[in-house]
Amino acid sequence: MTRLLHILCSVLIPFCTAVVALPSPLAARERPFSPGSARAQAMGMTWIACTAPEDAAFFNPAWLASEDERFTIIRLRTGANSDGLALLFGQTGDDIRMFGSDSGAGIPPRGFMDTMTGFDAVYETSGPLFLSYKGEGFGIGLYSSSRGGFNAHGTTLPTATLEHDFDIGAIAGLALPITLDEDTGLQLLLGGTIKYLVRIRHIASEVPLTEASRLVDPFAFSGDFRIGQAIGSDLGITWRTPYFSVGVVWYDWFGTTLSWNEYSGDFKTKDTKLEDTHITPMIGAGIAWTPPDLFGLPSWLFSNTQIAIDVRGFLEEEDSFFKMLHIGFESTFLHFATIRLGINAGYPTCGLAFLLFGGLNLEYTLATEERGRLPGQNPLTLHTISVTLML
Amino acid sequence: MPRCSVVLLLLCLLPGCNFFSWAASVDDSNDYDLLVAEARAHMSAGSPEKAVDYFSRALAIRTNDIQALDGRVEARLLILTDGRSVYTAFPRLFATNGSASENLFTDLPPRLGLLLATSLAAAHDATVLDSLFSHTNTARTARLTADAAVANGLTALLLAADGNTNGIPGEAGDPILPGADFGIRLNTSGFAPAFVDTARGHAQAAILWLGRLAMAAPLSMATGTPLSAFRRSLVRFASNLSEVRP
């Protein structure tokens, strides 16, 4: 017990000191870096106490101390709202390119304009770069992800804007398991990561909708963009028994700061002075229960059941506790299909995953996230498909 | 299993519902950012009327704020068009073959009253916004200019149709009815001419906006485009109004 107290003090005292010493994190707040996970999305964005091995380095470094090894070669994940799907896969993207290619049009056809009025596409991806190896007590990862939005404004002479972030992250972490009680299997897992992050940001200024093809066509890309670089670190601590686990993670604990440079469309550095931006440190806590069976059903029918609760965002300026609350459930049916349900800041989520050939994971998720500041204010529903190849 | 199916079905049907929305309200908030976020959320959800309310509350906190004014102009235009483009919502405004025997507006007077109030407010907002924001982005300038032109043009036409100045155009007692050819049909004589001058003032303002649009975005005002047709019609309408006498 004394040993445990020593460990806790040695971890918590620097945490608290750093919190007091931190500069105001609220100026120019950046979205945290994350490779994203269809599993977490389907489980209401819970991950702290129920982290999958391939995500341990990214989501809770303490889980790097667990016994299992996992080598993930690739993850391709694409998510979009209904307007985003129309842009990525539907007729809308083709229409924009077609009408945009005719620069003499002046005003787009009215039927197309009716479709585009209020058009608000959001899309996010993981990959194509995704490589992670989790050994026993350590892990490394390399990933790329992106998130963007395309929207149209105006009913008379509409304009379009595009914002797009492309992230590349490299992460390495170490973790240590400490057995506290061999009889009950109680273990303390401590872990930390250090990460190097690059964010490439393209914010297109408002352009006429008739010229939007150059925004959505990756081969006609032009315009200025910014590249921000940062070094960050996450710390995690988890107690676990065979059936329960409790975790606390401190993301970006020393305040990850992005330093920006601006480049022209032909990759020449511009002399623009840009202010640093910050990823706010965030503390999250999670609890997970792994029952031996689901409602007494045989384990060949339902297995690997987990119920998890996360509360994240303690250090952020949040307007509502409920926006920080995440609840998730998963259970595997016939050792083949995994059903996932959750509540993400009040919004129901669900997903289905199939593990094929022992290493190919196909996942679909329907999840809503909150874009506003209060629960229920501005929902964004994303359909996500994901393919992960693991060894 | 049936229970699971019901839950899955509900999840698919209700992805945008929030179990905790009861716990949050912006009704008594004086937080500018929160009010603007709420207004934007209503715009996204297809409720521009509510968006206008929240933008107005935000503007009560920060008078003449560009972001909120821009949002309110956009929301008011969406109210006018029922969330469509102006060309679909008001096809006769941009047509070149309107008949003198047909009314320019086919909506019932109560709806026209709402359109008049909204277009008047949008025209005012657009004028204030134009005086505030920097015109460095050509596309944005063109969008605002076009919206201002349509709002002023619509206001001119609706004001002309509201001769008894009760705020509801197109009533049986209103002395003037604009035709689909942008001509003037007199219902009654012996009216006060002030409303005609007001309507003509808005028509001329719309023509000026369209002139500015021709400089900012020449293609949109090229011959054969709906906005160039609208300009020609408004010039004719203003001329017709100047000849109206009680």
Image (cartoon, rainbow, N blue to C red):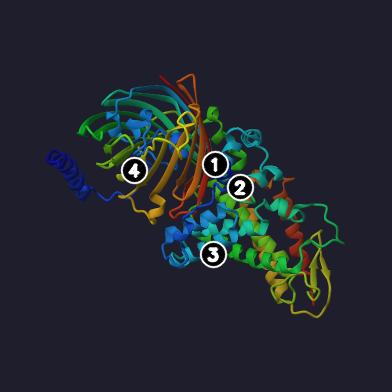
Respond whether the residues carrying marks 4 and 3 are from the same subunit.
no
Looking at the image, which residue is at 37% across and 43% down?
A: A30
Which one is in front in this view, the residue at disc 2 or the one at disc 4?
4
Residue B42 pos. (x, y %): 55, 56
Name the amino acid, label 2: Pro
User: How many residues crowd around disc 4 within 10 Å: few (fewer than 14), some, or many (20 or more)?
Assistant: many
User: How many residues crowd around disc 2 within 10 Å: few (fewer than 14), some, or many (20 or more)?
Assistant: many
Task: Provide the residue designation for mark 2.
Answer: A158
Looking at the image, which residue is at 43% across and 34% down?
A: A37
User: How many residues crowd around disc 1 within 10 Å: few (fewer than 14), some, or many (20 or more)?
Assistant: few
- Inspect this view and state whether residue B149 appears: yes
Residue A96 pos. (x, y %): 62, 36
Task: Provide the residue designation for mark 1.
Answer: B4
**Quadrant in the rendering for residue A209:** top right
Residue A211 pos. (x, y %): 59, 38
Name the amino acid, label 4: Ile
Task: Provide the residue designation for mark 3.
Answer: B53
Task: Provide the residue designation for mark 4.
Answer: A287
Structural distance between the alpha carbons of marks 3 and 1: 41 Å
Which one is in front in this view, the residue at disc 2 or the one at disc 3?
3
Chain of the residue under label 1:
B
- In the figure, is residue B180 to the left or right of B10? right
Q: Are marks 4 and 1 in contact (CB under 8 Å)?
A: no
Residue B31 pos. (x, y %): 41, 62
Respond whether the residues carrying marks 4 and 1 are from the same subunit.
no
Name the amino acid, label 3: Asp
Q: Give above or below for A151 relative to A353.
A: below
Q: In this rendered view, identify the residue nearer to me: A306 or A42.
A: A306
